[in-house]
Amino acid sequence: MIDPLLALQTAIETVLRADAGVETAFGDHTVRLYDRVPEARGVNIFPYITLGENDQAVDDSDGCNDTAECYVQVDVWSRGVGKTEVKTIGQAVLEALDGADAITAINAEMDDFRIITCRVDRLRYGREPDMLTERCNLVLRYGVAPVT
């Protein structure tokens, strides 16, 4: 089986950039979504979303199953006072990536794979050690199978 993580990451990025709820949650800011955050000397790049770690576990216990469990981490970063901004954007990201409509949207962006299951593995909000930055850490687990 070809690795589905790249297809899944690309589809997730497309869905997040097009999602009206995510755009609304950013308010007056442009939706910023990075695989790698650019250096921003003296420029406020907050809030933004990053695509973090990805893992895959292939269940081949029966010798013929091509289903993979893919773990996708998405982080929201904010310097808004309090947790309102990070939680608002975090909730919008969660709604864009979890549930039947989200699965349909992500599947529409993938040619060779389809999501068969989705569940939230972790949703955590916290303050970073710099004591200025708030973070939403979201990990989703997708069961992905090749299109046959």
Image (cartoon, rainbow, N blue to C red):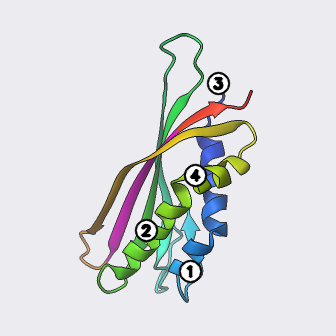
Image quadrant where one finds the C terminus: top right
- Badge 4 or badge 1: first in the primary sequence: 1
The CA distance from mark 3 to mark 4 is: 25 Å
- Badge 3 or badge 4: first in the primary sequence: 3
x then y, percent, for residue 97: 54, 56
Q: Residue at x 43, y 68 (%)?
A: 90
Other residues around mark 3 within 10 Å, as few (<14) / some (14–19) / many (≥20): few
The CA distance from mark 2 to mark 1 is: 12 Å
| Numbered disc 1: secondary structure | helix
Reading the image, the residue beneath label 2 is 90
Image quadrant where one finds the N terminus: top right
Q: Residue at x 50, y 73 (%)?
A: 39
Q: Viewed as shown, does residue 121 lie left or right of 25?
A: left
Q: Amino acid at mark 1?
A: Thr
- Badge 1 or badge 3: first in the primary sequence: 3
Q: Answer yes or no: is residue 109 visible.
A: no
| Numbered disc 4: secondary structure | helix
The CA distance from mark 2 to mark 4 is: 18 Å
Magenta residue span:
133-142
The CA distance from mark 4 to mark 1 is: 21 Å
Reading the image, the residue beneath label 1 is 24
In the image, residue 143 sits, relative to residue 21, either above or below, namely above
In the image, residue 59 sits, relative to residue 146, either above or below, namely above
Reading the image, the residue beneath label 4 is 100
In the image as oriented, which residue stretches furthest toward the front? 100
Q: Answer yes or no: is residue 27 visible.
A: yes
Q: Amino acid at mark 3?
A: Met
Reading the image, the residue beneath label 3 is 1
Q: Quadrant of residue 96?
A: bottom right
Other residues around mark 1 within 10 Å, as few (<14) / some (14–19) / many (≥20): some
